[in-house]
Image (tube, rainbow, N blue to C red):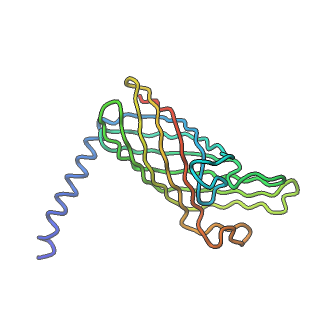
Amino acid sequence: MIRTSTSRPFIIVALSFVMTLAAAEVRAQTFISPLLGYDFGGSSGCPEVTGCEEKNLNLGVGFGRMGNVVGFEQEFAYAQNFFGEAPGYESSVLTVMSNFMIVPNLGPVRPFGVIGLGLIKSNVEFTPESLLDADHNHFGWNVGGGLIVFFGDHFGIRGDIRYFHSFQEFEVAGFSLFEGEKLDFGRAGGALVFKF
């Protein structure tokens, strides 16, 4: 009896929160956002967000729905030469993330934060003979934030920084490249936003 009575306020608050989110989703608008960025820090070939001479491009696209407070985004991004460039060596990282967004509608300028889970797929290949070719699928998470500026009702630009981190250790052919560390990196990006 005591457990039931003390849980009632929590249930009421939780239901109110869910109803608020549902009401926000009724007014949600669909968006698509092609992005261009570069990876830095952690496992990437670029040690820091600034002062990196060899920035390797990260290309991708995100799409989803934004309400007045919350939203959802599905994002795909691909980075070639992720671990750096060298003769006879290729690498890449693909990320596929499902993100929950906090994106309050403050007018044409909308700050936002994202957090999500998904796939981080890494590939390392020594060419041309391919003595070592390793593909790894990592379950991971990402978190970040930025700013969207809209110019009218349907077009805007976005800038953000996100951090990606795998749950498993990163290995190639059974050997840890980063002394038992997990695959992690940051991404600085800019994007167009088309809302309809």
Residue 102: image location, x then y, percent: 35, 46
Q: Residue at horizontal 22%, vertical 57%?
A: 14
Q: Residue at horizontal 37%, vertical 34%?
A: 29
Residue 82: image location, x then y, percent: 67, 52
- Residue 137, compared with residue 195, is above or below; it is below
**Residue 167, quarter of picture:** bottom right
**Residue 108, quarter of picture:** top left
- Residue 39, compared with residue 5, is above or below; it is above
Residue 114: image location, x then y, percent: 42, 49
Left or right, residue 136 beside residue 17 = right
Q: Is the C terminus in the top left, top right, bottom left or bottom right quadrant?
A: top left
**Residue 25, quarter of picture:** top left
Q: Is the N terminus in the top left, top right, bottom left or bottom right quadrant?
A: bottom left
Q: Residue at horizontal 50%, vertical 32%?
A: 192
Q: Residue at horizontal 66%, vertical 45%?
A: 55
Residue that sits furthest to the top in the current view: 152
Residue that sits furthest to the front in the current view: 51
Left or right, residue 186 beside residue 64 = right
Residue 23: image location, x then y, percent: 25, 41
Residue that sits furthest to the bottom in the current view: 2
Left or right, residue 55 beside residue 17 = right
Q: Nearer the viewer, residue 84 or 24?
A: 84
Q: Nearer the viewer, residue 156 or 22?
A: 156
Count the marks: how many? 0
